[in-house]
Amino acid sequence: MIVCVSFVVFAALMNLSSVEAGFGFGGCPNQGVVDPFVQLTLTGTWYEFGKYAGLDQLVSICTAIKYTPASNGLINVEEEGITLFMKASRKGQMKRADPSQTEGKYSISFWTDAYKGRENDITAANYNVLAIDPTSYVIIWNCFDALLFHIVNLRVITKDRVPSQSVIDEIYNELSDRQISTFGFARTSQQNC
C-alpha cells in the first residue's frame, strides 16, 4: 500500500513538474530577492526568454508580457503569445506580497480584479524577483514544498525580443551563481513574431 501511495505521489509530482516547473528533493532552497525593488523598473513590455519546460513550451512562441501600473500599487499584467498557431492572451494583476516591504516578492493572479480591495493585504508570494537589470532581463522564481520534494517555477524575461549574447551569458551566470539548475529550462522561440 505504501509503495502504491508513493508511486501515486511521485507520478503526481512528475506531472506537476511537466507544467512549467522543476522539482527537487527536500525543502525549497533559500533564494534571496532583489531588495529594495523599485516596481516601476518592471513596467513596459518584456519578452519571455525561457522557463522550466512544460507541455505548453512545445506549442507556445512569441510570448510577450506587458506590465502597467494601476491604482493603489497594483500592476496590471497582460500576456500575449501564439499557441497552436493561434494568438492567445490572458490578463491579470500583481501586487507586493507584503505592501509594507520593499523587496521583490509579489503575488500574481490571472483573475480579473484579483486584488481589488485587497491591495494592502499580505498575500502569498508566488512571483519573486531574484535578479533584474532594468535594461535587459528579470529572473522570476517561485518554490513551494510538496511532501518530500519541492516544486520550482523559473521564468526569465528580457527587454529585447532577442537579447544579445552578453545578456544571455549574464542570465546563465546569474543562474549558475545561485545554483539554479538549467536542466529543463527551455528557451521560448521569439523568431518570426
Image: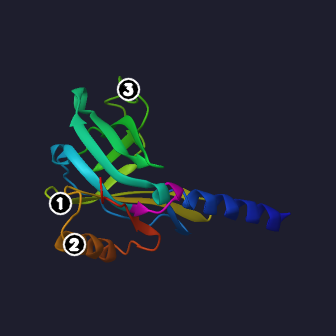
* Secondary structure beneath label 2: helix
The answer to which of marks 1 and 3 sits earlier in the sequence is 3
What's the residue type where badge 1 is placed? Ser
- Apparent side of residue 37 relative to residue 176 in the rendered image (left or right): left
Say which residue label 1 marks: 136
* Secondary structure beneath label 1: loop
What's the residue type where badge 2 is placed? Glu
Say which mark, if any, is on residue 170: 2
Residue at image location 27% in from the left, 33% down from the top = 74
Q: Nearer the viewer, residue 173 or 58?
A: 58
Q: Using the image, determine if residue 88 lies above or below residue 32.
A: above
Question: Does residue 96 appear in the picture of this structure?
Answer: no
What stretch of residues is rendered in magenta? 51-56
Crowding at dot 3, Cα within 10 Å, few <14 / some 14-19 / many 20+, comes out as: some
Residue 82 position within the rendered picture, expressed as x and y whole percent measured from the top left: 40, 48
Say which mark, if any, is on residue 113: 3
Q: Nearer the viewer, residue 111 or 89?
A: 89
> Farthest residue in the left direction?
135
Callouts 2 and 1 close, C-beta under 8 Å? yes
- Apparent side of residue 6 relative to residue 46 in the rendered image (left or right): right
